[in-house]
Amino acid sequence: MQLLIAAAGTALAFALLAAALTDVMDDLRRERDVDPLTGVFNRRGLQERVAGLFRSAGAPLSLILCDIDHFKSINDAHGHAAGDRVLTTFAGLLRESVRDADIVARIGGEEFAILLPALDVDAAMAVAESIRERLAMHRFPVLGATESVTATFGLAQRHSSERFEALSVRTDARLYRAKREGRDRVVATDTPLPAGSAEVALPAKATKPAV
């Protein structure tokens, strides 16, 4: 009986140790894959999930890349603490605007990516436009009552069997085209559309984007 009790105790101890190690490993993975400021995935976290998603996701699948407009000016005028607040608020808005199955990541200073499985380009366009409009209407106390923040969006739907790197290049090209055309808009095609079309949200305000 004592041997059985001792064996059971040893088994329980190993089970508790294994559970503790699992928790530690999960915490380490979260620290590795999550941006500490915004709470969304970082670039590594995004890349870690892309392979499995691209294997399992059926068509369609869309990618949105978005960039907060004139973010350096926000830091210069209001300080980095205010800039951090803008980033965290924008990341929260992105999470609120997508589904649980979607992936949101901060991939650069003020640049974010959203992977949308099972959404075609039209549905992804609606998501991006909703985010753009919500951000433009939001007021940040750290910036004052009248100053607004805008963002620019590029998006593309994955071609059949297209690798993530190729999809990212196409989407990034559309993001930079949107910046050249004046920012605060969504671009989802490679060919410029006439002024007043649904894709061009505002009249062009600049001809050369600041990276």
Image (cartoon, helix red, strand yellow):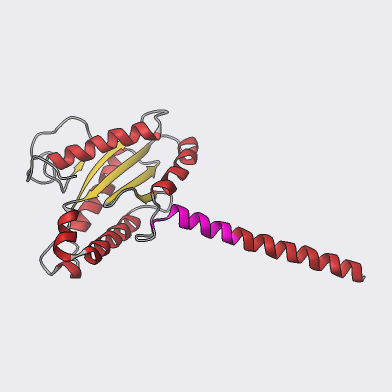
Between 77 and 97, the one nearer to me in the picture: 77
**Residue 105 drawn in magenta:** no
Q: Locate residue 138: give its quadrant.
A: bottom left
Q: Position of residue 130 (x, y in %)?
A: 24, 52
Is the residue 72 above or below the residue 54 in the image? below
Q: Position of residue 112 (x, y in %)?
A: 30, 49
- Drawn side of residue 187 relative to residue 205, left or right: right
- Drawn side of residue 59 relative to residue 68, left or right: right
Q: Position of residue 197 (x, y in %)?
A: 12, 38
Identify the residue at image location x=68%, y=63%.
17
- Drawn side of residue 89 relative to residue 103, left or right: left
Q: Which residues are magenta?
A: 23-35
Is the residue 156 above or below the residue 24 in the image? above
**Residue 29 drawn in magenta:** yes
Q: Quadrant of the C terminus?
A: top left
Between 206 and 158, the one nearer to me in the picture: 206
Identify the residue at image location x=12%, y=69%.
145
Is the residue 89 above or below the residue 170 in the image? below
Identify the residue at image location x=33%, y=46%.
113
